[in-house]
C-alpha cells in the first residue's frame, strides 16, 4: 500500500463525501471498512464516499503525514481504527495535533474504532486522546456504528398525534402550538 490509497464506495456517481481512515493493522482496517459500508448501505444509501486510507506507519514520514493532514482536514468523516494493543505511537499523536488544529471549524465526525485489548488502560487512553482531538477539531465523536434501524421519519402531524395519545393531551397541545419568532 502506498502512503495514502483512495477508493470510492456506494451511492450514486457525483460529488462524494470524503472519508479519511487511519488504521494500525489489517483487523482495524476491516472494522473501518465495515463502518464505511454501514454509512452507505444502512444510514444513507445515496451517499457516495471517497475513501482515503493511511496506515499508522506511514505517519513516520513527514511528507506522508502532511498529505494525511491535508486529506483529513477537509474530510466529512475521519475514522481512526486501532487494535489498542499498545499506546498510540508518537507519530500518530503529532499527526492528531497537526490535523485537529487545521480543521478550521468544518463540521464533521470522528469515528473512533478502538478494539478492547487485555490492557484496558490502553484502550481508555486511546479513547481519551481521540475524544480530545475531536473536541479540538470541533467534530462529533462516535465510538461505533449506531445500533438502530434507520427508517423514514414519520409525518409530523402523525407523530404529534401518536405522542399526544401516548403522553396525554397537554403534551399534544404543546407540540401543536406554534412558536412565535423572536
Image: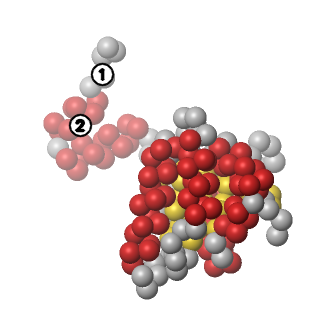
Callout 1 secondary element? loop
Q: Position of residue 141 (x, y in %)?
A: 47, 53
Viewer-side residue, 7 vs 130: 130
Viewer-side residue, 27 vs 43: 27
Q: Residue drawn 74% across and 55% down?
A: 62
Q: Nearer the observer, disc 1 or disc 2?
A: 1
Residue neighbourhood size for the residue with mark 1, other residues' Cα within 10 Å, grouped as few (<14), some (14–19), many (≥20): few
Q: Position of residue 6 (x, y in %)?
A: 80, 58
Residue neighbourhood size for the residue with mark 2, other residues' Cα within 10 Å, grouped as few (<14), some (14–19), many (≥20): some
Looking at the image, which residue sits at the far bottom? 118
> Which quarter of the rendering shows the N terminus?
bottom right
**Left or right placement of residue 48 versus residue 41 in this view:** right
Pointer 2: what residue? Answer: 172
Count how many numbered circles sit on residues in the image: 2
Viewer-side residue, 166 vs 9: 9
Pointer 1: what residue? Answer: 179
Q: Residue drawn 44% across and 74% down?
A: 122
Looking at the image, which residue sits at the far top? 182
- Residue 176 visible in the current orientation: yes
Q: Position of residue 146 (x, y in %)?
A: 47, 62
* Circle nearer the N terminus (1, 2): 2
Q: Residue drawn 54% across and 53% down?
A: 110
**Left or right placement of residue 148 versus residue 10 in this view:** left
Callout 2 secondary element? helix
- Residue 46 visible in the current orientation: no
Amino acid at each position: 500500500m502506498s502512503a495514502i490509497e483512495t477508493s470510492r464506495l456506494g451511492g450514486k456517481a457525483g460529488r462524494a463525501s470524503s472519508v479519511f481512515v487511519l488504521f494500525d493493522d489489517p483487523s482495524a482496517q476491516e472494522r473501518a471498512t465495515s463502518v464505511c459500508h454501514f454509512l452507505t448501505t444502512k444510514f444513507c444509501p445515496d451517499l457516495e464516499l471517497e475513501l482515503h486510507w493511511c496506515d499508522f506507519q506511514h505517519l513516520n514520514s513527514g511528507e506522508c503525514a502532511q498529505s494525511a493532514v491535508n486529506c483529513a482536514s477537509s474530510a466529512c468523516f475521519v475514522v481512526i481504527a486501532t487494535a489498542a494493543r499498545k499506546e498510540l505511537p508518537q507519530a500518530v499523536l503529532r499527526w492528531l495535533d497537526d490535523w485537529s488544529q487545521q480543521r478550521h471549524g468544518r463540521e464533521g465526525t470522528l469515528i473512533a474504532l478502538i478494539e478492547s485489548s487485555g490492557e484496558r488502560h490502553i484502550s481508555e487512553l486511546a479513547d481519551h486522546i481521540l475524544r480530545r482531538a475531536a473536541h479540538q477539531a470541533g467534530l462529533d465523536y462516535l465510538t461505533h456504528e449506531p445500533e438502530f434501524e434507520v427508517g423514514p421519519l414519520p409525518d409530523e402531524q402523525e407523530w404529534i398525534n401518536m405522542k399526544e395519545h401516548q403522553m396525554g393531551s397537554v403534551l399534544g397541545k404543546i407540540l401543536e402550538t406554534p412558536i412565535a419568532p423572536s
